[in-house]
Image (spheres, rainbow, N blue to C red):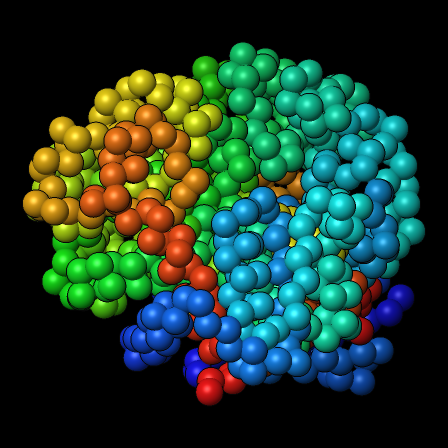
Amino acid sequence: MLSKKHLLGIEGMPIPEINDLLDRADYFANRPKQSFPDILSNTTVLNMFFENSTRTRVSFEIAAKRLGASVLNISVNGSSVKKGETLIDTATTLNAMRPDILVARHHASGAPLLLSQHVDAAVINAGDGRHEHPTQALLDALTIKRSLGRIAGLKIAICGDINNSRVARSNLYLLSALGAEVRLVSPATLVSPYFAEMGVPIYTDMEQGIAGCEIVMMLRLQTERMEGREAPSQHEYFHLFGLDTHKLQKAAPDALIMHPGPMNRGVEIDSKIADDNSKSLIRTQVELGVATRMACLEAVAGAKL
Amino acid sequence: MSKTLLKNGRLICPSEKLDMLGHIIIEGDHIASVGTQLPDNADFDTVIDCNGCVIMPGAIDMRVQSADPGAEHLESLSDLLAAAGNAGITQLVSLPATSPVIDSAVMIDSLKLRASSYKGALFHLYGAMTQSLDNKHMAELGMMAKAGVVGFANSLESVSNSLLMRRIMTYSKMLDKPIIHHCSDPYLSKDTDMNESETAIRLGLIGEPSIAETIILERDLNLVSLTGCRYHAAHISTASSIEALRLAKRKGLPVTADTSPAYFLLNDKATADYNTSFRLNPPLRDEADRLAIIDAIADGTIDAIASDHHPIEMDRKMLPFGQAACGAAGVETLLPLAFSLFHTHSISLTKIVNALSVAPAKTLCLPIPKLAIGTKANITIVKLSSSSVIRGSDFMSQSQITPFEHYLIDSKVAGCFVNGISVTS
């Protein structure tokens, strides 16, 4: 059970609740073939995706179905939003159909909070603008925990486009709360000095930034940002901030690599590293996404067995 | 001729260097007596006891965006003037960003004609600096000057072309009208949601650095020294802009500035829960900026306090923060919020009265409002020590979105006279 009705972000979430969610997700992850149709029976889950997504939407859908919920997917294409309806009107209309849980992704920061103020359903934030992506951070934490047995005390570098990343923010809050030593590695144009005011060390040199880190978490960088905007070119970006075998040598021995996907191969990460299952946790992250979202859906439904 | 006695008030008149307990007698449309000797009550049609009140020269709100023409359903011109009068404002100046834009003499004639029949505050206009506010082509400034505008203003986008700005200033100097400029660098402010700050980072909103204002202001101040144009910096919000203004004034440039209550009473932390009533332009700044604005009011670097009234439809506020429109109601809260500087920051009543009446009049070359025998009876009465809470739903106007919802105020408007006529309900 959560102390709040909605799951909108990691910031300010009590640590015991985070641990409960991770424990429950771990339980589900240990039973990958098992369904739990009683947990969310008679529950309707609406996936409202105002922004394109494949992996997150499918992950939530599978998670909800494994818990026995009825699931509806609404994507912005072909919905009334395209016809000029406001977010609140759409929410109010859908609310009248009495869904129990709304899973929302939106390109505007704060949109899930606004939705939560106008619907009766519990809202799960599936990623809002540059703000938060709480289920991604939870699945990342679960991935680290299951791989290395702990989070506290680990050195974790989050690398790439920090300013525009909701994944970076949610992970920063969550991993720090659980005792990891988080660093941000980014070109100076993509990480605001205000992150330093939150007490997070910032590195603009990739090799220094990942030095001694047990986890190197890469973020996606939109290609148009590397065409002379925040970075001069993809070529220069990969040279300075792309993860390759050479730079990875600076990290701790047996360091593990993560990426929330989708990846820009050869831009932020060398394919050789991404596909090396001894180093890369990328596939595990996707796999554990389902178990994590099962735990989150169950928690907001308040229907723990 | 009707006679009204305002008795037992604290008369504060900066231009007459007056601060004393006394009375005012209004006869017809003018002030007939200012004094300490209380006359016999029996001679008056109306007697108002002003015990505990400041009696000041009529407040002038020099920065109001009327929704009329174009969005009359939000707030018609008659509603605006009535609401302003009821809130103690005797004169207001409306900005040109209406639909259509106020960029021609005919628009000015028509609006002034309409306003002349409405009750409440007296109405003045700024003309647009550029045609349709396109920031590219100079508007018919000369024709608008003849039609009686008090100055020329832009919208919430600055004239970024320095050559055009130079020409507008040179032309405006020829007409002896001030330029009222909203300063924001078009590149640094593009697509931004709020002030650049830790709060913005946490909310995942895009921040505008405070220097976006100062960069354009400093360019403008250089152009003022080149052209000699009278220049007024609108709704100044940052400490770095204050520094620039201080320097310009020290050099003796013909420069004035205003701010509005949001910039001296609120900071950017207010936006922490994405409440769109705090989405303003310029955005709310940080606490150091807020304190610098208060210092600048205290030392006169900021001359005037204006409401920055800007009616916005609820539909355009009930959106995710970054998509919501900027702006909020202001005329009905201007006076109590300005007087809160007296209660909470020990700024003298004379300074506050000056910023609300004399300073705007000087900048715009309007007759200096004063409490003096024979002058027009434009008078505002403010009761000090009267606690209440601001609620948009209590406003007289339909424009009710305010960043000061639930804000505690310690004073209230107790009366207002425009040309001798009471305009409060």
Query: Observer-nearest residue: A279 or A138?
Result: A279
Query: Observer-nearest residue: A60 or A173?
Result: A60
Could you tell me residue B293's position as x and y percent?
40, 51
Could you tell me residue B271's position as x and y percent?
48, 60
Q: Is residue B273 rendered to the left or right of residue A117? A: left
The residue lying at 35 percent from left, 19 percent from top is A233
State the image quarter where residue B202 is shown.
bottom left
Q: Is residue B409 rendered to the left or right of residue A223? A: right
Is residue A81 depicted above or below B34 in this figure? above
Image quadrant for the N terminus of chain B?
A: bottom right
The residue lying at 68 percent from left, 48 percent from top is A76
Query: Observer-nearest residue: B204 or A70?
Result: A70
Is residue B248 depicted above or below B59 in this figure? above
Could you tell me residue B3's position as x and y percent?
82, 71
Image quadrant for the C terminus of chain B?
A: bottom right
The residue lying at 15 percent from left, 42 percent from top is A210
Q: Is residue B301 rendered to the left or right of residue B16? A: left
The residue lying at 68 percent from left, 16 percent from top is B137
